[in-house]
Image (cartoon, rainbow, N blue to C red):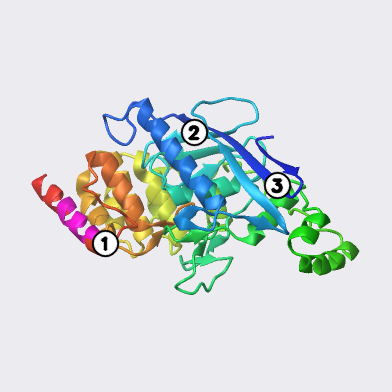
């Protein structure tokens, strides 16, 4: 198995093996990036994943307890591909995966997940993806009006960290006891009763009640296998109704395909549904005709920032810079865009700009507002020089 657990007395070790392969060539995030830079990126992800799951992130306590046992997380994350019993992560250049990180597997789980990430995914996103490798699902959805809703801890006080599987748009995040319950059920791991006698005798009372009930079972994901429907109407419907990772999968495939009917995409660009307009804007990145071009230009004034950013990206992919102002405006936004996992518009707009300009002007999407304003000034000056 790629994700395993072992126990020694009262210490449970969860081990995740995942391999990272860079597939977009020749450039990474800029023209001078080397394989060593890619190794550094993977090492940075690993450090963050390790810190978040072992609770040393942001000077956390560094102790993870689950039902009186201690839990330690180990992440083996080499660069490479095709090794048996390793989850496989193919890493693409920024902007190549408009839907976000995705999984081709039918089920989030423990064995041989096949994932696609962009090289610019931040550390919190990497830790969220590690959660999927330990059988955890997304805890957010998108409602019909285009707003995101957390399925977990929906009302978080301002001084409390956000739940990692529900929100990744800041660095103030944490893992939850419920996550450990789910993954230990999936890994068929139990904490022995004697750990409670040593460490927390009051837990025994709770245990005694448990003995009369069967332990909770790990619920498999009931969503059917992801197969890209051949006809666009079904594809658009699935993107709208499916969970976030299915939406990401479809969006990334739509961006790959060159055979989609451009009339259908142009029509979908004026759909009342924000998910449909968003998907159409992504699909049009490959279509080079006058109607498609005019529709993308019109979409730069869409009421949803998700559509504006994707329309700008699609135009850029065709060598047209008309969307640059929309991307620069998005740098000042506090809104989220449709993506997996949840991403701030300014974060993704900046990644597209950085890919295009091979510059960052020191813009930190999660940095202090004052520094961001100064970086946006530098980006605007760059645009005026063009
Ligand atoms: Zn996710």
Q: Is residue 378 magenta?
A: yes
| Picture residue at 54% right of the left edge, 26% below the top | 81
The residue nearer to you, when weighing 304 against 15, is 15
| Quarter of the rendering occupied by the N terminus | top right
The secondary structure type at the circle numbered 1 is loop
Q: Whole-Å distance between the Cαs marked 1 and 3? A: 44 Å
Magenta stretch, main secondary structure class: helix
The image shows residue 32 at horizontal and vertical percentages of 26, 29
Q: Which residues are magenta?
A: 371-379
| Quarter of the rendering occupied by the C terminus | top left
Upstream in the sequence, badge 1 or badge 3? 3
Whether residue 319 sits left or right of residue 188 in the image: it is left
Mark 2 surroundings: few (<14), some (14-19) or many (≥20) residues within 10 A: many
The secondary structure type at the circle numbered 3 is strand
The image shows residue 102 at horizontal and vertical percentages of 52, 44
| Picture residue at 61% right of the left edge, 32% below the top | 86
| Picture residue at 14% right of the left edge, 48% below the top | 382
Q: Which mark is residue 12?
A: 3
For residue 248, say whether it is visible: no
The image shows residue 320 at horizontal and vertical percentages of 23, 43
Quarter holding residue 305: bottom left
For label 2, the residue is 90
Q: Which mark is residue 229?
A: none
Q: How many discs mark residues in the rendered view? A: 3
For label 1, the residue is 332
248 versus 38 height, above or below: below
| Picture residue at 62% right of the left edge, 55% below the top | 64
Q: Whole-Å distance between the Cαs marked 2 and 3? A: 29 Å
């Amino acid at each position: 198995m790629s994700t395993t657990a072992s126990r020694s007395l009262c210490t449970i070790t969860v081990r995740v093996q995942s391999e990272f392969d860079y597939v977009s060539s020749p450039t990474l995030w800029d023209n001078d990036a080397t394989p060593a830079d890619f190794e550094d990126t993977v090492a940075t992800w690993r450090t963050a994943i390790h810190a978040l799951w072992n609770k040393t992130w942001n000077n956390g306590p560094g102790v993870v307890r689950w039902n009186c046992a201690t839990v330690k997380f180990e992440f083996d994350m080499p660069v490479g591909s095709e090794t048996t019993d390793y989850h496989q992560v193919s890493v693409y250049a920024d902007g190549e995966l408009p839907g976000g990180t995705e999984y081709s597997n039918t089920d989030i789980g423990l064995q041989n997940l096949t994932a696609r990430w962009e090289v610019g995914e931040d550390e919190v996103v990497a830790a969220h993806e590690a959660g999927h490798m330990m059988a955890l699902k997304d805890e957010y959805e998108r409602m019909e009006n285009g707003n995101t809703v957390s399925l977990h801890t929906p009302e978080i006080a301002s001084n409390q960290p956000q739940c990692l599987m529900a929100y990744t748009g800041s660095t103030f995040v944490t893992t939850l006891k419920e996550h450990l319950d789910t993954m230990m059920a999936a890994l068929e791991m139990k904490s022995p009763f004697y750990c409670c006698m040593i460490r927390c005798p009051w837990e025994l009372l709770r245990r005694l009640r448990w003995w009369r009930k069967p332990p909770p079972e790990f619920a498999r994901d009931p969503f059917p296998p992801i197969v890209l429907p051949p006809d666009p109407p079904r594809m658009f419907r699935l993107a709208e109704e499916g969970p976030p990772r299915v939406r990401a999968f479809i969006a990334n495939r739509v961006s790959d395909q060159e055979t989609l009917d451009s009339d259908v995409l142009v029509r979908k660009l004026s759909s009342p549904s924000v998910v449909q307009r968003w998907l159409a804007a992504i699909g049009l990145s490959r279509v080079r005709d006058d109607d498609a071009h005019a529709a993308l230009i019109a979409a730069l004034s869409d009421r949803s920032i998700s559509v504006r950013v994707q329309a700008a990206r699609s135009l850029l992919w065709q060598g047209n810079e008309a969307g640059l102002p929309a991307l620069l405006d998005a740098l000042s936004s506090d809104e989220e865009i449709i993506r997996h996992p949840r991403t701030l518009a300014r974060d993704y707009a900046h990644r597209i700009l950085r890919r295009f300009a091979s510059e960052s002007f020191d813009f930190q999407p999660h940095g202090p507002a004052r520094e961001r304003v100064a970086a946006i000034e530098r980006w605007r000056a760059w645009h005026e020089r063009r």
